[in-house]
Image (tube, rainbow, N blue to C red):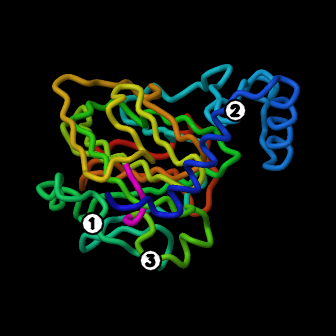
Amino acid sequence: MSKKHYTSLASSLFGKFASREYPSSLQNIINRSYVRFMGLDMSRFDEPQSYKSLNKLFTRALKVMPEIDKNDDAIISPVDALVTDFGQITKGKAYQIKGMSYSIKDLLGSNYLQDLELLESGSFANFYLSPKDYHRYHMPLDLRVLSTTHIPGKLYPVNMPLLKNKLNLFIENERVILECLTKDNKKLFIVLVGALNVGKMKLTFDDRIQTNASAKEITHYKYDDLHFAKGDLFGWFEMGSTIVIFAQKDSVKFDKLRLNQKVTFGDTIGKVVC
């Protein structure tokens, strides 16, 4: 069996620390120190001392769900994040950040080769979650999930210096891919990209996918009748990372986004193209 990459080992060790429930007095110090050091805004969440581990603080739920645009053609941000890039898929390539392109074929892997032509001239958008952000992710519109693919990989930090300087960062890192259909039967892919530290990505609907674990092989699961409404929770990162959305040509427009924009879960970021 091949050894884990050092980024995965470091993430596993930090994950053990973050998942442990310490005595309440010590846990309170850990949580409050993290909140202060990272500059977390806890106004939408429970008090730091209410979380029994650092990991529970990372994956904290909102106290009140935001109001979202219920119109069928409105697309919402699935997360709290920084928009590091967005635009059109050209010659099979998208950008992790301006000037740093990568192959969609290499990112999605062999299970979705038949969809590459559909994605050509389509849209992409990158959402970077820092360690201080809300880590749960939600559906950007009404979607049917057709399949998921887990591709094991490394867990390099997904931050601005690495986005600017490390070629194929998204492709080297571990990732989980959701293949989806819109109400108009257009393809949309949601890609969860792992990152350093706890490095786990959870899905509410399939606990067979275990990230930052011992898995070395790509796994692929299909679903017959799995539907989500816009805004539905479908999982969470255990530490900061990135979500990338790829949309079929003439299906969506991210016309409410700006480069380096800070978005919040529920913000309207685009529209479905009719």
Residue under the image location 18 percent in, 37 percent down? 185
Disc 3 or 1, which lies upstream in sequence?
A: 1
Identify residue for label 3. 167
Other-residue count near label 1 (Cα within 10 Å), few / some / many at <14 / 14–19 / ≥20? some
**Can residue 274 be spotted in the picture?**
no
Above or below, comparing residue 180 to residue 50 in the picture: below
Q: CA distance from mark 2 to mark 1?
A: 34 Å
Q: Find numbered disc 1 in the image and state the secondary structure of the residue it sits on.
A: helix
Task: Pick whichever, 28 or 194, lies toward us.
Answer: 28
Circle 2 — which element? helix
The quadrant of the picture occupied by the C terminus is: top left
Disc 1 marks which amino acid? Asp
> Disc 3 residue type?
Leu
Give the left or right position of residue 113, taking residue 73 as reference: left
Percent coordinates x, y for residue 111 in the rendering? 17, 52
Distance from Cα at disc 2 to Cα at disc 3:
32 Å
Horizontal side of residue 240 vs 52, given as left or right? left
Please tell me whether residue 150 is drawn above or below residue 10 in the rendered image: above
The disc labelled 2 sits on which kind of residue? Leu
At mark 3, the secondary structure is: loop
Give yes or no for residue 110 being in the magenta stretch. no
Q: Earlier in the sequence, mark 2 or mark 3?
A: 2
The residue carrying mark 1 is 106
Camera sees residue 41: yes
Residue at the image position 23 percent from the left and 59 percent from the top: 109
Q: What percent of the width, then of the height, locates residue 244?
A: 42, 53
Q: Position of residue 206 (x, y in %)?
A: 33, 28
The magenta span reads 171-175
Q: Which residue is mark 2?
A: 57
